[in-house]
Amino acid sequence: MAAAYVAGALTLDDAAQVICGVGHGFEAEALRDSLAGIRPAQPAVPMYSTVTGDRLVDRVPDAAYWVENLCAPVLFPAAIGRLFDAGHDTFLEISPHPILLSEVHAGADERGIPSTLLRSMCRDEPERATMLASLGALYTHGQTVAWEQLHSGSGRCVPAPTYPWQRQRFWLDERNAAEVGINDGAPSPVGVEPAAGGAPAEGASLNEALRRAGRQERQRLLESYLGAQAAGKLGLTAARLDTQSPLKHLGLGSLTATKLRSEIERDLGIDVPVIKLLDDASVAGLADWLADQLSGRGSAQPDPAAAADPSATQPNGQTDATHVAGPPWIDLLAQVPQVSDDDVDELLRQVMAGQDNQDEGRC
């Protein structure tokens, strides 16, 4: 009955009349008389009958059909088989509680056909939630849903905002050894561009490339190097790192700044005060400052740790006690391997506060 209504063969009133007639246990002739007033139509979608076991063609479900439905054997497995043969694999049982899906499942197993079996309602379960779950399952399996009928109030359906496109490429290109410059298995230094022909120049290294480069090329190499180092420590890709934004605004903290400083010292041989990394420095600004240091035009900037080194000696070889005296942060610097993150933060706060006091004194 539900199928006849959904297929458009019966109106809702006619379907209700048939149900009421059958439900009152009418005899065949009495049922025929009670259904004389229904006006069935040709189904708008294919309708497979459990009376004939096949698709209804050139016939409408009139009063005679429903009398036959009441009296004739139910050919449900045959009708389901025809549906499988026609390529259908998704079934929704419209009933107060699913009782026929097990039969459909058996037919699918017999033919080895994957199928989706859904229910419209289920006993002791919330009706709307059950129906919406099946509707969602139909949608995810590629069925078209008339959302405007579900949301028929004053609202309207709008597309949800999409996730911003990152415009990053992650495809792996198939390239041979010559194209990627594989010779002895050693990785190419960061920031060094391959020479013409694809392979890096003989004995190429970042420092050698920086020494040979002009000012503009040196700046580019330094930005590439610093960008890769900073991005790795901030959990970003180099492509997503804004080289103009201060590193501290991108998440660079005191501990990370200390590690970055150590790597720059190791790779470039330039002492970079930690304060410089945390004082509104961007990758582009640091690259410019480092380029000046390499060119010999930058002013010498003492390393705060050097001033606090307790092993500093006088020309006579004796340790100068004044190098270990002073504010608490000087003592902390003498024990850098043992200090905690909180100690480092406190150290930097004291250093920067002292720098601010000096600036006020000069005003």
Image (tube, rainbow, N blue to C red):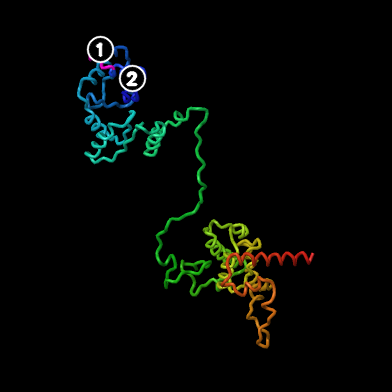
Residue 270 belongs to magenta span: no
Residue type, numbered disc 2:
Ala
As measured in the structure, the alpha-carbon distance from the residue carrying label 1 to the one carrying label 2 is 17 Å
Judge whether 24 appears above or below 351 on screen.
Answer: above
Q: Secondary structure at mark 1?
A: helix
* 63, 346: nearer the viewer: 346
Q: Secondary structure at mark 2?
A: helix
Please tell me the numbered disc located at residue 30. Answer: 1
Q: Position of residue 49 (x, y in %)?
A: 26, 25
Q: Quadrant of residue 51?
A: top left
* 192, 289: nearer the viewer: 289
Residue type, numbered disc 1:
Ala
* 93, 190: nearer the viewer: 93
Task: Quickly name the residue at label 2.
Answer: 15
Residue 27 belongs to magenta span: yes
Left or right: 182 as drawn, with respect to 118? right
Q: Quadrant of residue 15?
A: top left
Bounds of the magenta segment: 24-30
Count of numbered circles on the image: 2
Q: Position of residue 48 (x, y in %)?
A: 27, 27
Judge whether 54 appears above or below 343 on screen.
Answer: above
Q: Residue at x 26, y 37 (%)?
A: 105
Looking at the rendered image, the quarter that the C terminus falls into is bottom right
| Foreground disc of the pair 1, 2 | 1
Q: Residue at x 52, y 72 (%)?
A: 205
